[in-house]
Image (cartoon, rainbow, N blue to C red):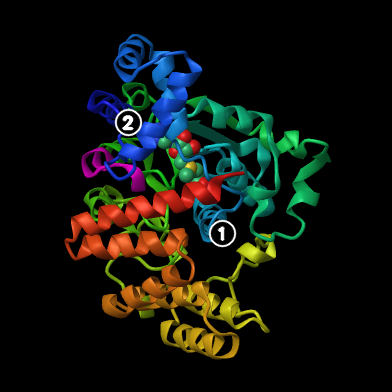
Amino acid sequence: MTPPPEITEMLHRAMGFDAAALSESAVGRAVRKRMAQCGQRDAPSYLVYLRASPLELAQLVEELVVPETWFFRDGKPFEALQRFVMEEWLAANPERPLRLLSVPCSSGEEPYSAVMALLDAGFPPERISVDGVDISNVALGKARRGIYGRNSFRGAYPGLQERYFTATPHGWLLHEAVRKLVAFSQGNLLGADFSLLRGGYDVIFCRNLLIYFDDLNRERALAVLERLLLPRGVLFVGHAESAPVLDKWFAPVVSPQAFAYCKKSALPAQGKLSPPGAGLGRARGESRREMLPEKPAARLRPLPQAVSSIGQPPAGNTLEQAQCLADQGRLAEAAVQCEAYLREQGASAQAYYLLGLVHDAGADAENAKEFFGKAVYLEPNHYEALVQLALLAERRGEIRNAAQLRQRAQRAQQRRGIK
Ligand SMILES: C[S@@+](CC[C@H](N)C(=O)[O-])C[C@H]1O[C@@H](n2cnc3c(N)ncnc32)[C@H](O)[C@@H]1O
């Protein structure tokens, strides 16, 4: 069934998603399911019902959101959070609580990971104040329950469950001591209610949502985030979200793969104070070679091993070594390591993906495209490689191709998100 355009338009207004994220087939599926559940026989009568019921619109939105998330997703942002807070923020704010916003927080893994990272770093729990906001009441219900299954721990983080969770017949229950530090509420980043939020956040995580917005709504969302973030605060976005529109208000401040930004308005004039987050790595205008040296995280309790790659490349697994070298900006060495891995182990989507990232970071878009393409050839549902291909296509101005790739990426993510 082709959904009436009025429904797609209502969803677009409610969620801000672009055409690829609100594809005819996805909306059609969601509408069919909701029609069956509320006993509406045809699309026109469902449209009348939908127009009269904000609750039904919320239910329809639930069918289209992608709640995919897991603890310590991408790892690096949480290491950067530890460094920012312990090595910079604490000295400037010796007494007041740290305020952190996670939007969208989905089922809570992201804000809870931020709390656990801070606790692991030795930050006092009584000074942690975290807000988690999401459009989905279903996801928020899971967040408040705090019980998690295997998929929420999909990275191998030795000891995380043992330290912070209790096994129950329904899954792993997060300790109350962590849960009570996060206040969850329902909200739409594009809604009027959101712009009324109090603001004053030291850190904002807004990851894996902007990618679904069309340009106009991405810009609206970033304007809201800019207002909510304190002048010396840090914004973390997802790895595929460093779109040009970010440049309007924000400037990148940290090492590769943390995707952290400070407010442009907080950038110092030449020779004045350092920008917020300067201790985290590369600041705008510096080349990767000029990146600030990695600070030893001596005062920090390290994050679980799988998410921590500060320091020496691990021995024994050349792909991990390659990742670690790439994280340190040692791109040529990372490429050599990936190629050695491919020679020894044969074709590997992850190795090609990493080679793609290395070439992209080295401004070699042609080779980056080829390697991401190989990753997708081997693993057609390789979400990250599809997103990178979409970004490359966008940069070349191939809008239609980019939209198709984003659509494929979204389908791949939905498949992967089936828990
Ligand atoms: C892929 S999850 C990202 C969760 C987490 N930030 C992460 O990166 O793991 C996307 C979330 O965005 C939420 N969402 C979608 N549109 C939204 C909006 N307009 N405002 C707030 N949340 C939204 C969805 O409900 C979903 O839980």
Q: Residue at horizontal 32%, vertical 20%?
A: 43
The verdict on residue 213 being magenta is yes
Residue 122 in view (yes/no): no
Q: In this view, does 382 lie to the left or right of 26?
A: right
- Residue 171, picture quadrant: top right
Residue 190, label in figure = 2
Tell me the amino acid under the disc marked 1. Answer: Gly
Residue 75, label in figure = 1
Residue 374 position (above or below residue 78): below
Quadrant of the picture in which ligand 1 is shown: top left
Tell me the amino acid under the disc marked 2. Answer: Leu
Residue 140: x %, y % from top left? 56, 29
Q: Which of marks 1 and 2 is nearer the N terminus?
A: 1
Q: Which of 379 and 298 is in front in this view?
A: 379
- Residue 166, picture quadrant: top right
Classify mark 2 as within 8 Å of ligand 1 or not, answering yes or no: yes
Could you tell me which secondary element the residue under label 2 belongs to? loop
Residue 32, label in figure = none
Classify mark 1 as within 8 Å of ligand 1 or not, answering yes or no: no
Viewport quadrant of the C terminus: top right
